[in-house]
Image (tube, rainbow, N blue to C red):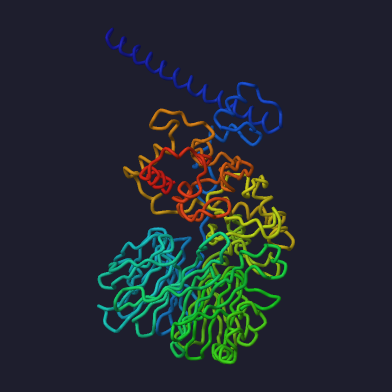
Amino acid sequence: MKRRLIIALATAAILVAGLGIAWSRADKTIRQNARIRVLDVVHGAGLRLPERDREHMQDRSGLEDISNVSCRDCHGATTNSLPWAQPRPRHASPSGLAVSARGDRLFAAAPDTDEVIEVETSTLKVLRRAALPGRPTSVVLHEPSGSLLVVCRDQDRVARLDLGTLTEKESVFVGLGPVGLAIASQGAIETTRVVVANTLSDDISLLALQPLREVRRLPAGREPYGVATSADGTAAYVANRLAVMPGIDRAPASELTAIDLVTGRISARHRLDSAHLSEAVATLPTRGWILTPMVRVRNLVPITQVARGWVMSAGLALVTPDHSSVIQVPTDEANRYFADPSDLVIDPVRERAYLVSGGGDAVSVIDLQRLHLWLQSASESTLRTAIHQLEVSGDYVLARIPTGRNPRRATLSPDGTRLFVSEYLDNAILAIDTTTLKPQGRIVLGAAGLDDPIRRGERMFTWAGKTFQGQFSCRSCHPDGHVDGLNYDFDGDGVGDNLLDNRSLQGVASTWPFKWNGKNPSLEIQCGPRFAKVLMRTDPFEGQALKDLTVYIQSLPPARTRHAQERALSPAQERGRALFYATETPSRIPIPTERRCTTCHRPPLFTNRAKTAVGTRGLNDTTDHFDTPHLLGIAASAPYLHDGRAKSLEELWTLYQTNDLHGVSSYMSKQQLNDLVEFLKTL
């Protein structure tokens, strides 16, 4: 009995001691957080901080001027608390579409709800919904094998579903972020190829159908997106969404990639000058044409030219039958634009094209026979400048059919009498009678989601109606909220001499201030009056619309990269991590606080929200201070520096590092720099 009493008392003592320690720690945390809150209030009110705290903040930030430094920049910040890390409502938004050979069934991918939806076309009623994880984005039918192939974008795979049961039978992993999908058949199942555009890894997967497996991976341009195949199944064509700038002051160009499916090799890379946002491709076998929608971007002209309609316009790039040249023709009108062309469907019998405008909420109907006649009559000089002459579109554009908000993809019934258009942000599919060119009905997949501020904000983000003459939307420069890889000539430091790199909006929550000069303290100011004055040239987003827009932007997670998905760091990445967090060189020479990587790029957001001079204007130039960008998803946001002069992360320290102003790196060997870059790619 005495022994039990001693044990009980000892246990109680241990528990009390443990509780005391826990309470002490909790009390210390509470007191620390309270102190941080008090200091934030003092600092935010512009009052003078206690000298001890001022010295501490100057030491840790490496800055003399700490007017923009907050205690919470170092203490209490976690990515788990950011808006993009929180759960959000999901909506039955249709993306890719496919219609059966008999025209009686329509299949839609709903990426936001992880579903594949089957619709009866005669009644426009939903028949079945099948769950499919991984953000299904594109679908294509192969009825001889009874298969529905689906791209699962977030899981980097293509799944094969049984048409009878809509259950998954097999899948294969492809490149990163697959989007585009097409089937090329030469008759036999053994020679049938599935072509997949892997948007985030910049490559193309060629798959065999039975069994489903990857047979080859080919390099593409930047962000391959749309795919089409030739009628005989021997060729495939891939539209690459983004352009590449050969230099900060040179016009960009994107690529239309042609593949010989017999040899499994790239047969041509067609250059599309000053073109970007090409998200689809289609062929017209009767004339030997390959067509892709595009945005003609004039990013090197002063942004003041927005008021003259001279920065962006939509059009078609046409590869001639002999593949010797590319002709660009406009699809906009002189005083009315149809922004962000997102899909192109061709009726080869009627020689008619249907061009979907994701930002203009319309389908443009193009008479390809009239276009052919116009091309024949035009001189060589006219053809070279046609994309700039918006008035000529009236010679071949037959009609504009209004749609719901943000149409993404379209498909045509086998007899060509009905066009189905996915209205992504209305959660519906529009059926259009191609004889009358009038809407025939709508398949509602779910409520529009207008009670969700993120959804409302995305509707504003993708809509061109707020810009002058509807020339572009936020998405035009920030596809998927990311970057277009271009520099633009903003007029902040004088017209014609202020090229600035476009920065990603993904992962920007809590990384204020904004702009390269750090002048905009909030997204509300950045996207409101500032955006209206500099870009929209119309009335700004106001009130609830502006709030919704900023809520949507803050919901965007950092860019997804292959490196960031790896569970464990490689030896090279571990070495790079040690270099990133280093406070002294291998020779034990201390690295000044202001020249350490982690001072400016402090975890977990990898920015100190301050402006820093890194010498990019010239050797030892410390006069220009630029906002410190966050590094989350940095591997996917080339080019780099304020004017985009560094084409890669490697160039940051090999070509544009000046006297260790951009972090102390002069002691690093080539291998060490490579290790540092490999670590940065994991963020």
Q: In this view, does 484 lie above or below 627?
A: below
Question: In the visual, does 59 lie left or right of 636?
Answer: right
Q: From the viewer's side, name the closer residue of 248 and 402.
A: 248
Position of 392 compared to 256: left or right?
right
Residue most extreme to the right: 539
Question: Residue at image x 55%, y 51%?
Answer: 555
* Res 584 → quadrant: top left
- Which residue of the protein is positioned furthest toward the front in this rendering? 619
Q: Does residue 453 sit above or below 29 in this rendering?
A: below
Q: Position of residue 370 (x, y in %)?
A: 58, 90
Closer to the camera in the image, 658 or 211 = 658
Q: Residue at x 65, y 22 (%)?
A: 50
Q: In which quarter of the image is the N terminus?
A: top left
User: Residue 450, image x and y in percent?
Assistant: 61, 60
Which sits in the foreground, 494 or 565? 494
Instruction: Using residue 415 as the reference point, say whether residue 219 is left or right of it.
Output: left
Residue shown at 64% from the left, 42% from the top: 623
Residue 257 position, x and y percent, is: 42, 73
Q: How many marks?
A: 0
Residue 294 at what x, y percent from top left?
54, 73
Name the residue at 71% across, 31% down.
Answer: 46
138 vs 20, nearest the viewer? 138
Q: Is 344 left or right of 493, judged from the image as shown?
A: left
The image quadrant of residue 358 is bottom right
